[in-house]
C-alpha cells in the first residue's frame, strides 16, 4: 500500500503507475480527467480524484494529530 501526504500526490501516482495498465475502455473513460489534471487552465476537484481512486482501488483518508510539546 502506498502512502501520500496529499490527494494530489496519490492521484498523480495513480496516473503514472495504474492508469497505463488499465484496459483501453477505462483509459478512454478517464482521458478527460487525466487531461484536466495535467492542464494548467483546468483542474480536477478533490471529490472527483477520490471517486476515481475509489473506483479503481481501495482508497482511505487518514487524519493524524500529534499534540505539540509545550
Image (cartoon, helix red, strand yellow):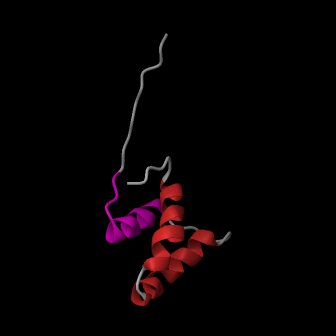
Number of marks in the image? 0
At horizontal 47% and vertical 19% (from top left) the residue drawn is: 68
* Residue 42 seen in this snapshot: no
Pick the residue in front: 44 or 23: 23
Image quarter in which the N terminus is found: bottom left
Magenta segment main secondary structure: helix
At horizontal 54% and vertical 69% (from top left) the residue drawn is: 16
At horizontal 47% and vertical 66% (from top left) the residue drawn is: 14
| 57 shown above or below 69 | below
* Residue 55 seen in this snapshot: yes
> Where does the image place residue 27, in percent across and percent down from the top left?
46, 84
| 23 shown above or below 37 | below
Stretch of the chain drawn in magenta: 45-60
> Where does the image place residue 23, in percent across and percent down from the top left?
40, 85
At horizontal 43% and vertical 67% (from top left) the residue drawn is: 48
Q: In the figure, is residue 58 to the left or right of 5? A: left
* Outermost residue toward the top in this view: 70
46 drawn magenta: yes
> Where does the image place residue 28, in percent across and percent down from the top left?
46, 87
Q: In the figure, is residue 64 to the left or right of 34? A: left
Pick the residue in front: 25 or 49: 25
59 drawn magenta: yes
| 32 shown above or below 59 | below
Amino acid at each position: 500500500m502506498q502512502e501520500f501526504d496529499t490527494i494530489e500526490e496519490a492521484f498523480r501516482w495513480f496516473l503514472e503507475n495504474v492508469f497505463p495498465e488499465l484496459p483501453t475502455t477505462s483509459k478512454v473513460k478517464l482521458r478527460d480527467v487525466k487531461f484536466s489534471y495535467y492542464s494548467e487552465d483546468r483542474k480536477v476537484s478533490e471529490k472527483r480524484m477520490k471517486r476515481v481512486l475509489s473506483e479503481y482501488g481501495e482508497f482511505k483518508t487518514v487524519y493524524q494529530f500529534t499534540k505539540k510539546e509545550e
